[in-house]
Amino acid sequence: VILIGLGWQLVVRLDTGKYLNIVEKLLLSFGVGSYAVYIGVSSVGHFRYDTTSMWCLVAVLAIFVVPGWLKIPWLEIRDLFSLEISAARIDKWNCVIWILILSVSLASLVQGLAPPNDYDSFLYHLSQPQYELEVGRLGIPWDRNVQNMFFPKLAGNFTRLSLALVGPGAAQMMMGIFGLIAAAAAGAIGYRIRKSRKVVLLTLLIFLTIRAVIWQMATVEIDVALAAYSTLCILCYQTWRDSRNSKYCLILGLLLGECILVKLYGMPVAAA
């Protein structure tokens, strides 16, 4: 919610042509606002990385987010939820698909509370943030001789923030949130190219039921985060194609940068 509030101010100012609907604004705001975690954790953690410093960072971000929160049309969001509930009551298939989406989403998030058990998390995704938390500051563990310490840090900083605030379970569930963002962005793309409500809902369900997605939503692996930012890039690109407004290219550029900051494999996304 904090990230959406931070990104909302920029997205709304650039959306002068009103081409974005409320869901697209929320999704793109999350993407743009993610820079706050990347810059904040890296800057503060360079000097001190522990529970106290990360809670202070969250408090500062919460202060800056107030103007964005005040501008978000909460009543419009409530009406959107009411509309979807009404549509589900009228069409039983919409209701069934929504139940499946919510069930799979909840199961994928809850499984993140299980103890870490994947190889990459033990090797560097979770072990390096845990090492930094024990040391008390961010840094490169030169004595460990692990090349993974030079990888991009955006998704890793989400793990660092969650790990310091709550623990490994929260860090794994944070990646689950990225899975939900990716699914919602895929559905938003379907809506933008004028697909029916059933097709949009099935898009969400199909993405969430991919075996790799279900597994990675319960780990601190970063591929789901890359999928989220990549899908947001496609959504923003489609908006630019529809509007031909160069202001959306600024949002697209920020999102492409985040793809690279998540994983080096984001470079082909940016190049494409």
Image (cartoon, grey):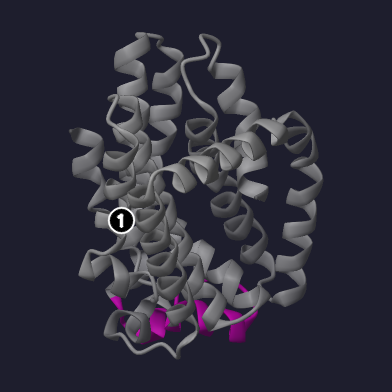
Residue 152 shows in this picture = no
Is residue 169 a member of the stretch shown in magenta?
no
Question: Could you tell whether 245 is left or right of 211 in the image?
Answer: right
The answer to whether residue 268 of the structure is visible from this angle is yes
Q: Is residue 131 magenta?
A: yes
Query: For the stretch drawn in magenta, what is the main secondary structure?
Result: helix
Q: Where is residue 251 in the image (x, y as percent from the top left)?
A: 45, 27
Viewer-proximal residue, 142 or 43? 43
Q: Is residue 209 above or below residue 269?
A: below
Q: Compared with residue 77, is residue 121 higher up or lower down, i.e. above or below? A: below
Q: Magenta stretch: give its range.
A: 127-146
Nearest the viewer among 203 and 168 is 203
In this view, 124 is above or below 24? below
Q: Give the amino acid at mark 1.
A: Leu
Q: 93 or 235: which is nearer to us? A: 93
Task: Identify the residue shown where x is 39% and y is 44%.
Answer: 91
User: Is 150 positioned to the left or the right of 9 in the image?
Assistant: left
Left or right: where does residue 3 sit relative to residue 117? right
Q: Callout 1 environment at 10 Å: few (<14), some (14 to 19), or many (20+)?
A: many
Look at 53% across and 81% down and name the residue there. Answer: 169
* Residue depicted at x 46% and y 40%: 87
Q: Position of residue 34 (x, y in %)?
A: 54, 47
For the image shown, how many numbered marks are present on the structure?
1
Mark 1 residue element: helix
For the C terminus, which image quadrant? top left
Residue drawn 34% across the image and 31% down it: 191
Q: Quarter-wise, where is residue 180 in the image?
A: bottom left
Which residue has dot 1 on it? 205
Q: Where is residue 58 in the image (x, y as percent from the top left)?
A: 73, 58
